[in-house]
Image: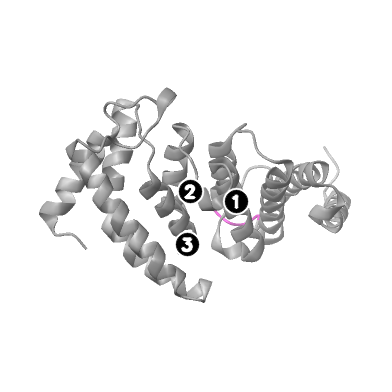
Amino acid sequence: MPNPFRRHQQHVRGLMSGAAVRAASLSAPAPDTAEGQEYAALLVALHDNLRTLSDIKSVEARAPYKAEMAKTFAPWIEGVLAAGEAQGTAAEDEILIWNMVWAFDYRDIDYALRLAAHGLRFGLSAPERFNSTLPCVVAETAAKIALDNPAAITLQQLLRVVEIVGDADMFDQAKAKLAKAVGRAFAAEAEAFDPMAENAAAGGKAAYLAGALEWLTRARDLGGKNIGVVKDIEAINRAMRALSDTSPPPG
């Protein structure tokens, strides 16, 4: 992990990395500049880290290594993010995008979404080995986390993913997986809803069920039967009928 002076230096050079680059013609920082040399040095460290990770067979066991490795790149990344906010510019940045992927893996979802928002705002590329676009990587990674382990990512975080990817051009299957994840998250909120809680959502359980039905229907429309939401939709419809039967009549 770099000392305080090196962290400051990396942060400043991260700030500089996008200064002369416009989103219309992205490239990595020029190698003959201080920020380009810093980027190149960090890129060497990144690729060394990736080789180390490839030697670890267990995907689960890699997560703590990624969290520790990420500390090396944090000052640079914070500088890049600050430049994006202040200057409205960004360069292609493999370091930032890999750290986004790692953050998803070690479950710092909010940090991953900060990096994803930057990457999608400026049209950055996904690493070549993904053989995919950045919007698809973000959508499918978040969806897989939610579908494999719903407790690892919140409904609000999934809705943030939806906001970040926006109307980006993606395969329908990627959109369907994300819609399925969001729909199931709404359904889980409906199941856990406590009307007596101080922070109970407006609209109550019915609003969560309506959200679940909307997103699961979208998943079915995009992914067909293979997306696996038919029984989910049936369960939501039953829950909505049951809720309607127990609701007091108007007036």
In percent of width and height, residue 115 lies at 42, 45
Distance Cα–Cα, label 3 vs label 1: 26 Å
Given this view, does label 1 or label 2 mark the residue nearer the observer? 2
The disc, 1 or 2, on the residue closer to the chain's N-terminal end is 2
Q: Which quadrant is the N terminus positioned in?
A: bottom left
The disc, 3 or 1, on the residue closer to the chain's N-terminal end is 3
Question: Which disc is residue 107 wearing?
Answer: 3
Q: Which amino acid does label 2 sit on?
A: Pro
Mark 2 lies on residue: 127
Magenta residues, start to end:
195-200
Mark 3: few/some/many CA within 10 Å (<14, 14-19, 20+):
some
Nearest the viewer among 226 and 30 is: 30
Q: In this view, does 224 lie above or below 228?
A: above
Helix, strand or loop status at disc 1? loop
Distance Cα–Cα, label 1 vs label 2: 41 Å
Helix, strand or loop status at disc 2? loop
Nearest the viewer among 37 and 172 is: 37
Who's the residue at 83% across and 50% down the image?
240
In percent of width and height, residue 149 lies at 61, 66
Dominant secondary structure of the residues highlighted in magenta in the image: loop
Q: What residue type is labelled 3?
A: Arg
Helix, strand or loop status at disc 3? loop
Residue 134 in sight: yes
Q: In this view, does 156 lie above or below 57?
A: above
